[in-house]
């Protein structure tokens, strides 16, 4: 799944436009999040890491949880226990499009049963919290941005 700025992604009955592709370089891996803007909301999609994978992670920003950073190894949220799976300092870059200013954040990603995830990012000026679930790629409808032709 290759997405580019300007592409449209249909998900759960709403259309989102790809605004930016962010790279989170940790010590042992690189995570990619596609920032998508829709009617009154922003979603973040983590594309599959291989062609054989059939699930994507779809996150949305949530109100801050009542925790401090660094967060604990287990977080109880909305009736689920989330266990810490990934953590570390990440160098965040904008691989494509216009997105947040590149820089460094400390990232914690948690997983609960049923493919539910939490991601906490501590930036120098704020803490951002994202929550969401994995979805089958067939739940997405991807439409590539059309390029205007200069000829008439």
Image (cartoon, grey):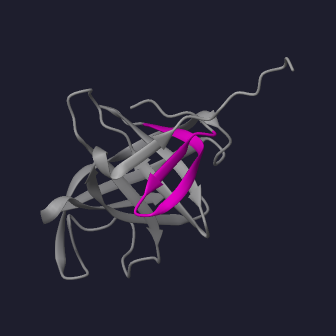
Q: On the image, which quarter does residue 33 sit in?
A: top left
> Where, quadrant-wise, is the C terminus in this rendering?
top right
Q: What residue lies at 84% left-to-right and 19% top-to-bottom?
A: 150
- Farthest residue to the front: give it: 152
State how many labels appear. 0
Question: Magenta region, mostly helix, strand or loop?
Answer: strand
Q: Residue 39: x percent and y percent?
A: 61, 66
Q: In the displayed structure, does residue 121 sit left or right of residue 94?
A: left
Q: In the displayed structure, does residue 133 sit left or right of residue 41?
A: left
Q: Please name whichever residue, 73 or 151, is drawn nearer the observer in this view of the structure.
A: 151
Q: In the displayed structure, does residue 68 sit left or right of residue 23?
A: left
Q: What residue lies at 45% left-to-right and 57% top-to-bottom?
A: 121
Does residue 17 lie above or below 13 as drawn? above
Q: What residue lies at 49% left-to-right and 58% top-to-bottom?
A: 43
Q: Residue 67: x percent and y percent?
A: 36, 77
Q: Please name whichever residue, 101 or 39, is drawn nearer the observer in this view of the structure.
A: 39
Q: Is residue 29 magenta?
A: no
> Where, quadrant-wise, is the N terminus in this rendering?
top left
- Farthest residue to the right: give it: 152
- Farthest residue to the left: give it: 113
- Farthest residue to the top: give it: 151
Q: Which residues are magenta?
A: 6-24
Q: Is residue 14 magenta?
A: yes
Q: Residue 13: x percent and y percent?
A: 44, 64
Q: Please name whichever residue, 51 or 113, is drawn nearer the observer in this view of the structure.
A: 51
Q: Residue 46: x percent and y percent?
A: 38, 44
């Amino acid at each position: 799944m290759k997405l580019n700025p300007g592409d449209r992604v249909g998900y759960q009955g709403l259309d989102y436009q790809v605004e930016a592709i962010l790279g989170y370089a940790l010590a042992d891996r690189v995570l990619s999040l596609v920032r998508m803007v829709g009617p009154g909301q922003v979603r973040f999609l983590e594309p599959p890491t291989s062609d054989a994978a059939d699930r994507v992670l779809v996150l949305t920003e949530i109100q801050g949880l009542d925790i401090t950073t660094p967060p604990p190894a287990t977080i109880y949220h909305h009736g689920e226990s989330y266990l810490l799976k990934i953590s570390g300092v990440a160098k965040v870059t904008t691989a494509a499009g216009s997105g947040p200013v590149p820089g460094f954040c400390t990232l914690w990603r948690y997983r609960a049963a049923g493919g539910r995830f939490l991601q906490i990012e501590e930036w120098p000026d704020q803490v951002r919290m994202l929550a969401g679930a994995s979805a089958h790629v067939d739940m997405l409808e991807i439409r590539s941005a059309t390029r205007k032709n200069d000829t008439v």
